[in-house]
Amino acid sequence: MGNVLVYAEQQNHEFKKWAFEAVAEGKRVADQLGRECVAVVIGNGVSDMAATLGQYGAAKVLVADDPQLAEYAAEPYTQIIVDAVQQTGADIVFLSASVQGRDVAPRVGIKLDAGVATDCTEFKVEGGNLLIRRPMYAGKINATIEITSAIKVATLRPNNFLPGEPDTSASPVLEHLTVPAGDVPVKVRETHVSGGGHVELTEADIIVSGGRGLGAAENYKLIEELAAQLHAAAGASRAIVDAGWVSHDHQVGQTGKTVSPQLYIAIGISGAIQHLAGMSSSKCIVAINKDADAPIFKVANYGIVGDLFEVVPQLKAELAAAGYTG
Amino acid sequence: MNSICCVKHVPDTAAQIKVASDGVSIETQGVTFVPSPYDEFAVEMAIRLREAEGGSVQILSLGSDAVIESMRKAIAMGGDGGIHLKTDQPAPDAYTTAKAIADSIKDKGFDVLWLGWKAVDTDDAQTGQLIATMLGIPCVTFVTSVTKEGDKLICQREIDGGHQVVEVSTPCVITAQKGEFEPRYPKLMNIMKAKKKPVETIDITFDEPRVVIKEMTPPPPREAGKIVESAAELVRLLREEAKVL
Ligand SMILES: Cc1cc2nc3c(=O)[nH]c(=O)nc-3n(C[C@H](O)[C@H](O)[C@H](O)COP(=O)(O)OP(=O)(O)OC[C@H]3O[C@@H](n4cnc5c(N)ncnc54)[C@H](O)[C@@H]3O)c2cc1C
Ligand SMILES: Nc1ncnc2c1ncn2[C@@H]1O[C@H](COP(=O)(O)O)[C@@H](O)[C@H]1O
């Protein structure tokens, strides 16, 4: 097999956490095949940051750095990734299963006559074949799949592969790619991204989620305060998204985000099958619910049966005493 | 605005999913099938656009005769008719599905082809981008609302950690994320009318797949854990036993 090419996503001159995860896993797979892991970075003013990827295992980093690439657009980004694949003789292409990675991966697949596997959680090289694990039916099923085309494209679930300690002595080869000319048919008018301190659900180590047990929209601040104290992301059940207490980007579940943090704290959430589908691969689950028979307790590692309006303030005080002050 | 909306017939999200005896597909006995939730958001947006701008909304479903049930449900929301891409073979992968849809609709003169951002069965989240790339037309994914301005469509879309407003010209592909509005409930009168709306049937065959399923397994079961008496005890266990704090 050929090399492994990894598209390392950055935003505003910072690599996404999942970029390092993808490069590290790309390196692990490349090692098993006796090949190299090559990373590609796209953006404006990104040349200086490119070498960082060497610390996670990229032997070489290809850089497409141009003012026209400041904002993600599917067509030029697709073309650059395709060019990078062809230039490096890669036959495995890794991207992240982020919004951007998911948007671009199938397009790359068509241009390369390659099959695409989405949201993969495990890669294994066996007898020269790449076996891939990915959840389906929102995690109700795990599938082992194989991509039969010569080139194989996969997106990697964020927060699932460990990037490991960076090797600060690594110095990868840097190469610049030519930037394709051509129309961008989708024009961006405005972009709004939540600023500093905000933790995304899909990359959070800890998630604190609230449900209908909160009783009223204004009580969601209990969830936000606890989340802030733990540097966690704030999640929600669909019931309170539908009720308009929080926006849909907080929703965890089959029709929300699928998450697998180290710690998931479900507060006033009953544990409907659609909610469990989105969070039951979390390493450790805590449930706080006044109903001892709530289904959430069937998947929780630790549960407190009690009124959240008593338990959550106590929990905040205990955490503060233990040094978790935000 | 002439729209085609792809609606997939999938297991209800409340269904327990079990692996069938062949080990590479799911047991469908006793499972209720419904239109995939994000497809309903797509249909809602397409109907809203037709209400504002005129035109038509056709509902497309690919699969056996069973998928007609979900197609009719979507037509009952306010669609003008259906396109059934008929096959008795299960779709092998996202690529073959996309190819069959692209080949069947490329000469239909649509302005917008709508899909869900993902179908809640295979969770592939690929079909829209695949079709658009095959047809060489633009594709906007994760869209939560659409309006028309001159000859452009203005789309709100979700991105990681925020949102974006983009403009695109037609013909194009749009994939729907859950948006500002709930899909409408079909009125009884429309359910009756939907049964009489014209459905075009196109027989299809699949290309060679590019992704094959080797094995399906249920996820490892989670054991119910401990009931803890106090917040203090919980914090101690999270730090000392689970080591997640
Ligand atoms: C197509 C479809 C897709 C769906 N997708 C999703 C999805 O992605 N995500 C999702 O979450 N749901 C989803 N659902 C909805 C799901 O079926 C449930 O309705 C929803 O998860 C329930 O939310 P909840 O647990 O907050 O509310 P409830 O089920 O009402 O539970 C509230 C819980 O709070 C507890 N409680 C009440 N007061 C207190 C208190 N003072 N202290 C402690 N505990 C208290 C109660 O005992 C109860 O267990 C979907 C449904 C459908 C039909
Ligand atoms: N068999 C099908 N019939 C109709 N639409 C489909 C079919 N398969 C996929 N789609 C469409 O493609 C979207 C994305 O599906 P997927 O890429 O499989 O996650 C779905 O939400 C549907 O809109």
Image (spheres, coloured by chain):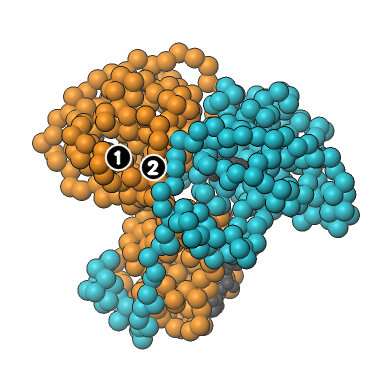
Tell me what hue chain A is rendered in: orange
- Tell me if residue B201 can be seen: yes
Q: Nearer the viewer, residue B76 or B97?
A: B97
Give me the disc on residue A146: 2
**Residue assigned mark 1:** A129
Q: Is residue B221 above or below residue B124?
A: below
Q: Nearer the viewer, residue B229 or A83?
A: A83
Dots 2, 1 in contact, CB < 8 A: yes
Q: What chain is tagged by disc 2?
A: A
Q: Is residue A51 above or below residue A269?
A: above
Residue A13 falls left or right of residue A142: left
Tally the marks.
Answer: 2
- Pinpoint residue A128: horizontal percent, then vertical percent: 26, 38
- Pinpoint residue A13: horizontal percent, then vertical percent: 33, 33
In the rendered image, the quadrant that contains the C terminus of chain B is bottom left
- Tell me if residue B45 can be seen: no
